[in-house]
């Protein structure tokens, strides 16, 4: 019992930090209670208070879920004051019942089960071994990881989770930090899904273009493809990523620290291995027995096989394409296929299949909680009027030459704060296109700016779906992934903004 109590004790330094955090939070709530007007949407710059609070809280405490919960409470507190409990519960219930969260629950929960099964039958190990035999350096293994993102281009969720599972072991061998692995996975997934016109992202945006009258019926994809050369964030993101992989851009900022830590961990592992070698004679009989067991497994066909990894992924992609890029159909078809395919090979029993699958879905619980409160927080600051304030601020300075640049900056910042993902496109297109037509700004460049803004937010927001899943797949926290990737993303934002500004004056 005493050991349990000691494990729950808080270090004095952490205790002081906790007290300061919540003291400042309480003071902020009290101040906003008195200064927020009755109609909070007319409070101007105060509408960004919940978003600013969330960002400061996350950077100071490194606790994202707690920050999202407090940010949500603050948003509704500003609107309803003391009567905010009921609206908060209604917002959470609304999010739980929304199509977005239901889709996320089905896709990510089931993917968690699929990944657990791939690991259990040794399929992930087989793929890792296949790659390990063909790569000779850190650079080549990272290029493999990036290129694989364009092979599994069909959906970003599937992209990041599958690659993280398959490549972590190989990148560990070449002393690549998990943070750098997450950066490669996240950046290439976003770029692949927005730049290849047959992904879930491309199909979704093409549909929105038709719905908003930006393209004729059946011509949404053709219009979308016209914007691809101007999707500067995706292009610049890939450029920065490749330069980082080949070593032209050296690790810097938090990523440099993560890389040094990975090197230290590898050296410790080498020392441990040397210690094991010294005692090898004592365990020789045991190792021989294990070798005989492995040989027997290979003869019986139970050794890890590459086909057990490749066929399920192929089924997933083919079924998704057949059902018009339907991820849910593809994932459930894959589960059924894996059950039959692995049973035929006697790799797993029906009872164990169910057990492993459920354990895999349970591994995604924290991810689902983050997404639940991320979406709830987005609803909260939208109700406060944060997005309206930022849009009004941008439109004030709009002109034909700078409009695409302003759209990129405003909606990129909005996505970074709110983590709207696809909802950003639903909101943005009906707003920016009429304004673009009114001031005679280039419509294709404007659409590309909105698309780039969504990728920017997806690539940098600490609590957006792709960031959370990339971190989960790489075995690190979303904060660690977000903070190490952010400097690279900011360089990409600067280059992309410059491209939109130059094109605004040329086109």
Image (tube, helix red, strand yellow):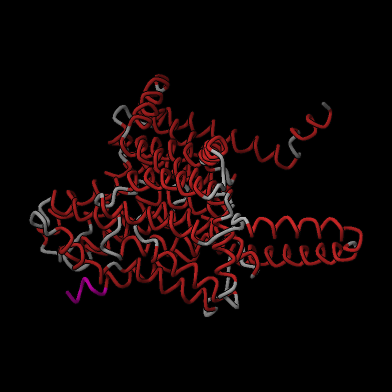
Closest to the observer, 73 or 452? 452
Q: Describe residue 496's horizontal placement relative to residue 85 as left or right.
A: left
Where, quadrant-wise, is the N terminus in this rendering? top right
Residue 12 occupies quadrant: top right
Tag count: 0
Q: Does the image show residue 66?
A: no
Where, quadrant-wise, is the C terminus in this rendering? bottom left
Residues rendered magenta in the picture: 502-507
Q: Position of residue 131 (x, y in %)?
A: 55, 69
Q: Position of residue 208 (x, y in %)?
A: 19, 51
Q: Describe residue 484's horizontal placement relative to residue 203 as left or right.
A: right
Q: Position of residue 265 (x, y in %)?
A: 73, 62
* Position above or below: 113 against 495: above
Residue 83 occupies quadrant: top left
Residue 221 occupies quadrant: bottom left
* Position above or below: 495 against 96: below
Q: Describe residue 325's horizontal placement relative to residue 296 as left or right.
A: left
Closest to the observer, 319 or 260? 319
Closest to the observer, 139 or 499? 139
Closest to the observer, 419 or 184? 184
Residue 451 magenta: no
**What residue sits 63% from the left and 62% below the top?**
258
| Most distant residue in the bottom direction | 248
Q: Position of residue 101 (x, y in %)?
A: 37, 37
**What residue sits 57% from the left and 48% below the top?**
347
Q: Does the image show residue 220?
A: yes
Q: Describe residue 423's horizontal placement relative to residue 345 as left or right.
A: left
**What residue sits 76% from the left and 63% below the top?**
269
Would you say the magenta stretch is mainly helix, strand or loop? helix
């Amino acid at each position: 019992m005493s050991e349990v109590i000691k494990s729950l004790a808080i270090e004095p330094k952490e205790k002081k930090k906790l007290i300061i955090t919540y003291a400042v939070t309480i003071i902020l709530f009290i101040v906003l209670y008195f200064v927020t007007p009755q109609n909070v949407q007319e409070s101007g710059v105060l509408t960004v208070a919940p978003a600013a609070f969330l960002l400061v809280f996350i950077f100071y405490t490194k606790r994202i879920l707690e920050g999202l919960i407090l940010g949500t409470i603050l948003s509704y507190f500003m609107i309803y004051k003391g009567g905010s409990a009921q609206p908060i519960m209604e917002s959470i219930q609304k999010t739980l019942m929304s199509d977005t969260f239901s889709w996320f629950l089905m896709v990510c929960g089931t993917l968690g089960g699929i990944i657990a099964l791939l690991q259990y039958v040794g399929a992930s190990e087989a793929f890792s071994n296949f790659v390990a035999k063909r790569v000779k350096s850190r650079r080549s293994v990272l290029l493999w990881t990036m290129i694989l993102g364009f092979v599994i281009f069909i959906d970003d969720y599937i992209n990041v989770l599958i690659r993280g599972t398959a490549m972590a072991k190989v990148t560990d061998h070449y002393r690549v930090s998990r943070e750098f692995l997450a950066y490669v996975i996240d950046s290439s997934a976003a770029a692949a899904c927005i730049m290849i016109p047959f992904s879930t992202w491309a199909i979704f945006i093409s549909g929105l273009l038709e719905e908003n009258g930006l393209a004729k019926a059946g011509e949404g994809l053709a219009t979308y493809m016209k914007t691809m050369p101007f999707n500067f964030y995706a292009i610049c993101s890939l450029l920065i990523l490749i330069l980082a992989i080949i070593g032209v851009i050296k690790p810097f900022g938090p990523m440099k620290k993560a890389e040094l830590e990975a090197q230290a961990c590898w050296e410790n592992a080498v020392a441990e291995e040397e210690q094991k070698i010294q005692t090898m004679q004592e365990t020789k009989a045991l190792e021989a027995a294990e070798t005989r067991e492995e040989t027997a497994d290979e003869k019986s066909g139970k050794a890890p096989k590459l086909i057990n990894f490749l066929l399920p992924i192929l089924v997933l992609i083919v079924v998704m394409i057949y059902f018009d890029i339907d991820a849910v159909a593809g994932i459930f078809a894959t589960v059924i296929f894996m059950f039959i395919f692995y049973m035929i090979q006697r790799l797993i029993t029906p009872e164990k299949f169910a057990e492993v699958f459920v354990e895999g879905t349970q591994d995604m619980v924290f991810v689902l909680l983050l997404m639940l409160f991320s979406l709830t927080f987005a609803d909260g600051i939208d109700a406060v009027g944060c997005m309206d304030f930022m849009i009004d601020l941008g439109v004030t300075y709009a002109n034909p030459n700078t409009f695409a640049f302003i759209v990129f900056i405003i909606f990129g910042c909005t996505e970074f704060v709110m983590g709207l993902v696809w909802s950003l496109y639903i909101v943005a297109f009906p707003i920016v296109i009429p304004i673009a037509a009114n001031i005679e700004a280039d419509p294709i460049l404007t659409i590309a700016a909105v698309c780039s803004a969504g990728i920017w937010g997806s690539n940098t927001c600490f609590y957006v779906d792709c960031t959370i899943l990339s971190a989960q797949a790489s075995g690190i926290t979303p904060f660690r992934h977000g903070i190490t990737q952010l400097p690279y993303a900011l360089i990409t934002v600067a280059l992309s903004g410059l491209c939109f500004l130059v094109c605004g004056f040329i086109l």
